[in-house]
Image (spheres, rainbow, N blue to C red):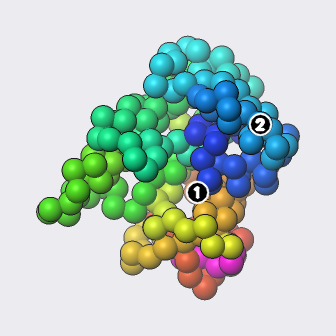
């Protein structure tokens, strides 16, 4: 399989690339990040999703089997970049996937998306949730994509356990990035999870067993 990962230098993206190795193509905007992606065994392609056109990205997606949107503006970024990366870059990737004929699209979103930010929320956090919600809404409106939206809880760098709770709605909680990557891999292998929005936290069900029943 040839899997395109938007946000290829992110912590989840690098974990995915380690699993996919030569099957992965990580999109990065910073040339200094190419070596880190290539160290996983994946291919790195320079592509600034805040500047590229859908046609340019579609050329990169030719012959791909799936797209994973793992990009995010990241900590320290302001409200404006939450919109240009967390929303607009997702829309761009979805547009490009449709043009390139790539149907499978997995979007890594966030718990909290799909509902208004809590009253009194930090303005940047509110912008982030609004951007993720808008990106999800855009994806759901696309009949040409076999999309799955994954909403992880609070992300940690603890070693993965392989034990999770995955459902359309779960209580708030945390989840290691290792386990998020494992779930994304399982989603890729299970087309029956298309057109579903799933929340993810740590739990007591092995990833393989849980995905098989979703």
Q: Which residue is the extreme one toward the bottom?
A: 204
Depth check, front residue: 42 or 92: 42
| Residue 27, percent from left and from top | 64, 32
Is residue 162 located in the magenta-colored stretch of the structure? yes
Depth check: give the residue in front, 28 or 5.
28
- Tell me where residue 16 appears, x and y as whole percent: 71, 52
CB contact under 8 Å: marks 2 and 1? no
Who's the residue at 53% across and 37% down the image? 145
How far across and down, in percent of the image, does residue 90 sit? 46, 36
Element assignment for label 1:
helix
**Vertical comparison of 188 with 169: above or below:** above
Quadrant of the rendered structure where residue 141 is? top left
Residue 211 visible in the displayed image: no
CA distance separating discs 2 and 1: 33 Å
Q: Is residue 41 left or right of residue 86?
A: right
Q: Nearer the viewer, residue 177 or 103?
A: 177
**Residue receiving disc 2:** 35
Q: Is residue 50 left or right of residue 78?
A: right
What residue is drawn where x is 29% and y is 41%? 79
**Residue 73 visible to an observer of this rendering:** yes
Q: Which mark is first along the chain, 1 or 2? A: 2
Q: Which residue corresponds to mark 1? A: 193
For the point 60% across and 24% down, which residue is it? 47
Q: Residue furthest left?
A: 119
Magenta-highlighted residues: 161-165
**Is residue 14 a member of the stretch shown in magenta?**
no
Give the main secondary structure of the magenta stretch. Answer: strand
Q: Would residue 156 be found to the left or right of residue 173 on screen?
A: right
**Mark 2 or 1: the one toward you:** 2
Within 10 Å of the Cα at label 1, are there few (<14), some (14-19), or many (20+) other Cα atoms? Answer: many
Quadrant for the C terminus in the image? bottom right
Residue at left 50%, top 31%?
Answer: 94
């Amino acid at each position: 399989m040839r899997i395109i990962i938007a946000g290829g230098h992110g912590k989840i993206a690098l974990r995915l690339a380690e699993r996919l190795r030569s099957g992965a193509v990580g999109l990065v905007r910073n040339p200094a990040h190419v070596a880190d992606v290539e160290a996983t065994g994946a291919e790195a392609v320079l592509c600034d999703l805040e500047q590229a056109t859908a046609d340019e990205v579609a050329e990169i997606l030719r012959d791909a089997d799936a797209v994973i949107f793992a990009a995010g503006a990241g900590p320290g970024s302001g409200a404006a970049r939450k919109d240009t990366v967390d929303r607009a870059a997702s829309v761009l990737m979805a547009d490009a996937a449709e043009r390139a004929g790539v149907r499978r699209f997995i979007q890594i979103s966030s718990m909290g998306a799909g509902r208004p930010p809590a009253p009194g929320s930090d303005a940047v956090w509110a912008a982030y949730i609004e951007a993720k919600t808008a990106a999800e809404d855009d994806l759901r409106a696309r009949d040409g994509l076999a999309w799955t939206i994954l909403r992880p809880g609070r992300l940690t760098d603890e070693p993965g356990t392989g034990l999770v709770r995955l459902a359309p709605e779960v209580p708030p909680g945390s989840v290691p990035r290792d386990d998020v990557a494992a779930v994304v891999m399982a989603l890729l292998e299970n087309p029956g999870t298309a057109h579903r929005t799933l929340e993810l936290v740590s739990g007591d069900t092995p990833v393989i067993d849980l995905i098989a029943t979703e």
